[in-house]
Image (cartoon, helix red, strand yellow):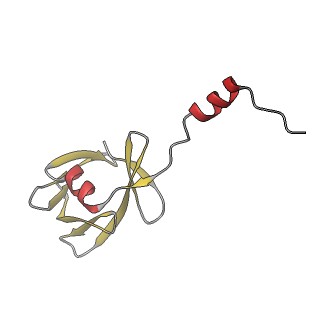
Amino acid sequence: MIRPVPALLALALTAAPALAADQPLNNAAIANLVSGKQFMLNGGIATFGKDRSYNFAGLFGGEWRATNRSLCIAFATGEKRCDRVVKNGKSIYLIDASGQRNLLK
C-alpha cells in the first residue's frame, strides 16, 4: 500500500538545496575572471595581464590563455600547464592535471 507523503514533508524535500557540484566555466568567463587581475595562489601572487602576460611572484613569466574550459600558461622557459576552472557554490577553483584543487582568491 502506498501512503501519501504529508504536504509539509514533500515541501521540505523539494526545497532542500542540492549539494554543490563543480560547474566548468567557459573560455569567455575564464578570460573575464582573470584578465587584468592578481590572485594569491600557492603562496605567491599570480598576475594575469590584460595583454595575456603572466607572472608568478616575480619569478616565473609567460603568457596565459583560456581554452578548452581551462586556464593555460605558456612559461618563458618553454614549459606549459593547463588547469581546469570550475565554480562550486560561490568559490572558483583551478584543478591541475593531478586533480589538486586550488581556490582562486
Kindly identify the residue that appears in the image at 55 percent across and 41 percent down. Answer: 19
Q: Is residue 81 left or right of residue 59?
A: right
Q: Is residue 57 visible?
A: no
On screen, 58 above or below 63? Answer: above
Residue at horizontal 23 percent and vertical 50 percent from the top: 33
- Which quadrant would residue 85 be assigned to in this image? bottom left
Q: Which quarter of the image is occupied by the C terminus?
A: top left
| Residue at screen point 91% across, 39% down | 1
Question: Residue 24, relative to residue 73: is it above or below?
Answer: above
Q: Residue at x 62, y 28 (%)?
A: 11
The answer to which of 32 and 83 lies nearer the viewer is: 32
The answer to which of 30 and 81 lies nearer the viewer is 30
Q: In the rendering, at what x and y percent does residue 73 appear? A: 25, 66
Residue at the extreme left of the image, as rendered = 51
Work out whether 14 lies above or below 23: above
User: Residue 79, relative to residue 100: is it above or below?
Assistant: below
Residue furthest top as drawn: 8
**Quadrant of the rendered structure where residue 97 is?**
bottom left
Position of residue 42 measured from the top left corner of the image (x, y, whole percent): 34, 49
The answer to whether residue 39 is visible is: yes
Q: Is residue 24 left or right of residue 78?
A: right
Measured from the top left, where is residue 21 in percent x and y?
50, 48
